[in-house]
Image (cartoon, rainbow, N blue to C red):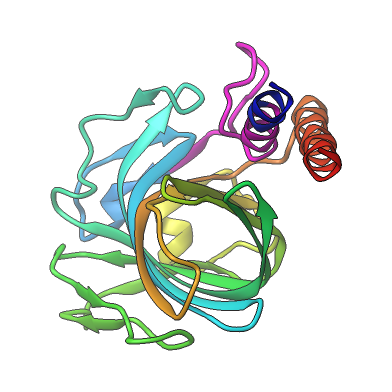
Amino acid sequence: MNDMFNGKLLAAAIAIGFGMVSAPAGAVVLQDFTVDESSVEGLGGTFDADKINGAYSEVVTFGAGTFDTVAYGDFGQYLSNDGTVNVTPIELNNSYGLYALFDGSGTFAALGGGLTGFTFTSASFSLYIDPDLDTTKALPGTAPGAVTLGNSGDDYLIGSASLISSGTGVLVAGVGGFFDLVFEDFALTNPDGTDYFTSPDPFYIRVNVDGDFDSFEVVGTQTINGDFSAVFQVPEPGSIALLGMGLLGMGVALRRRKAA
């Protein structure tokens, strides 16, 4: 009975701590931004959104308690109304592409109960426009390395970040997992980036990237697929308190599991 209770508490605490459980209505407010698709070879017009969704693939190479990862992600959806409404019609994924290249490294450790925790010590990403929606992407055989691009001669960089203030993830063996990364130095290129993301001006420097991934073995080199999203947001005091409660709960649950 105690093991079952502790297991449920641990799962709930991790879920809350990493944003997988919805907060009460009105507690989470995403910051709006404006996209001008006419900057992409004169396509569509402007629209407001507060979240971007996509899918990604990555290769991860594990060492003795360490990992390196290389990934690419394709964005396909803008959302508004605090991430609840799909923005349509837009040209993204119909006339042009928006993709990110990512690399990172860090440490991992078993948390018990089939859980593995990951902590990023460094990470960076670059955001590109693919005007003709024809770029191909291939992962390297191992990480670190570089994504091989094809038909990318007309692609252009619109933003990048390399200062990660927090980066964590959890794998549940045989099930899958989730991650949360916060970058503090997101910068748009000028004029390509500032012509695409037009408001606010100056643009947000903090970007929060989170998502989920399929199950994998924490050994050797693994190829992993998953979904991800990005928001530009300065945490509200209530959000920070919610995160703190989740992490506190996770710590209590871990102590109870170890004591059992």
At horizontal 63% and vertical 46% (from top left) the residue drawn is 113
Please, is residue 31 above or below residue 58 in the view?
above
Please, is residue 67 above or below residue 214 in the view?
below
At horizontal 45% and vertical 81% (from top left) the residue drawn is 220
Q: Is residue 7 left or right of residue 143?
A: right
* Residue nearest the viewer, comparing 53 with 168: 168
At horizontal 33% and vertical 85% (from top left) the residue drawn is 140
* Residue nearest the viewer, comparing 146 with 154: 146
Please, is residue 195 above or below residue 27 in the view?
below
Q: Is residue 77 left or right of residue 122?
A: left
| Residue farthest to the top, as pictured | 25
Rendering coords of residue 116 (x, y %): 61, 57
Rendering coords of residue 203 (x, y %): 60, 51
User: Which corner quadrant holds the N terminus?
Assistant: top right
* Residue nearest the viewer, comparing 56 with 51: 56
The residue segment tinted magenta is: 9-34
> In this rendering, does residue 190 appear at all?
no
